Amino acid sequence: MSSETALDLSEVDPPEWHVLVNGTVYGPYTLGQMQGFIGERRIGPGTQVAEGDGGAFLPAEQHRPLIPALKDMHLSSTEAEPSGEPSNYLIIAKLTGTGEMQLISAINRLGKFAEIMPGVWALRSSVKQAKLRERLRQTVTSADQVMIANASTGRLAWFNLGPEADVHIRRVWDAELD
């Protein structure tokens, strides 16, 4: 397909969405990309989002086009998830406020843990990584950054790092080595 016949979707789904994370604006993104970020739980109901050039940043749940994806995310997170085999997790958090005690309390309820160094915890839990991520997300603010490495499976999860970090992490984590 030449550039003259390439399908141009910019009028159907223009990149007009922006995301505010820790004072940094990311974007523009298309509605399809935003729905994908919601499905991956990179954007939650309280994430600050703006639609259009110069639009006000409001919680994602206040943007009508994002509500169906947010509802789907909520439904999938409330489904019962069977307890899995125990896994070893490494949790790394950069907390901006006073939420450390809430995070430690949440980690304590999820299994056996030890603080390795400030902002880094080792956790052994039978909770699956997606559920662990969701529970920790509920205890921190949108300005707090968290990364969860499952040492048992090699899987990585994170939230509030921003879409650009998301792209960089994905390029590295499963990259082919020469």
Image (cartoon, helix red, strand yellow):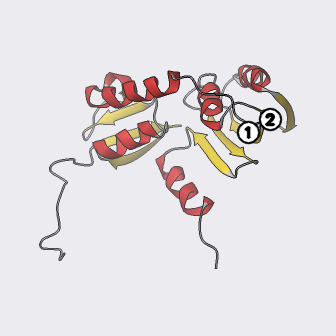
Q: Are marks 1 and 2 in contact (CB under 8 Å)?
A: yes
First along the sequence among labels 1 and 2: 1
Crowd band around label 1 with a 10 angstrom C-alpha radius: few (<14), some (14–19), many (20+): many
Say left or right for 52 vs 35.
Answer: left
Q: Quadrant of residue 53?
A: top left
Q: Nearer the viewer, mark 1 or mark 2?
A: 2
Q: In the rendered view, does 81 fall on the left or right side of 15?
A: right
User: Which of the 4 quarters of the picture holds residue 132?
Assistant: top right
User: What type is the residue that disc 2 sits on?
Assistant: Leu
Q: Is residue 45 visible?
A: no
In the depicted view, which residue is nearer to us: 145 or 169? 169
Residue 49 is labelled as none
Label 1 secondary element: strand
- Which residue ends up furthest to the left in the rendered image? 4
* Gap between marks 1 and 2 measured at Cα: 8 Å
Mark 2 Cα within 10 Å, few/some/many (few <14, many 20+)? many
Residue 88: horizontal and vertical position, in percent?
79, 41
Say above or below: 11 vs 72. Answer: below
Q: Is residue 131 visible?
A: yes
Q: Is residue 86 left or right of residue 38?
A: right
The disc label shown at residue 123, or none: 2
Looking at the rendered structure, the kind of residue marked 1 is Ile
Residue at image mark 1: 91
Q: Position of residue 86 (x, y in %)?
A: 77, 36
- Can you say which quadrant of the picture contains the C terminus? bottom right
Identity of the residue drawn at 77% across and 24% down: 104
Q: Is residue 144 above or below residue 5?
A: above
Residue 27 image point, x, y percent: 37, 48
- Please state the horizontal and vertical placement of residue 50, each as a whole percent of the image: 33, 34
Residue at image x 39%, y 28%?
72
Residue 99 vertical placement versus 25 (above, below):
above
To which quarter of the image does residue 122 belong? top right
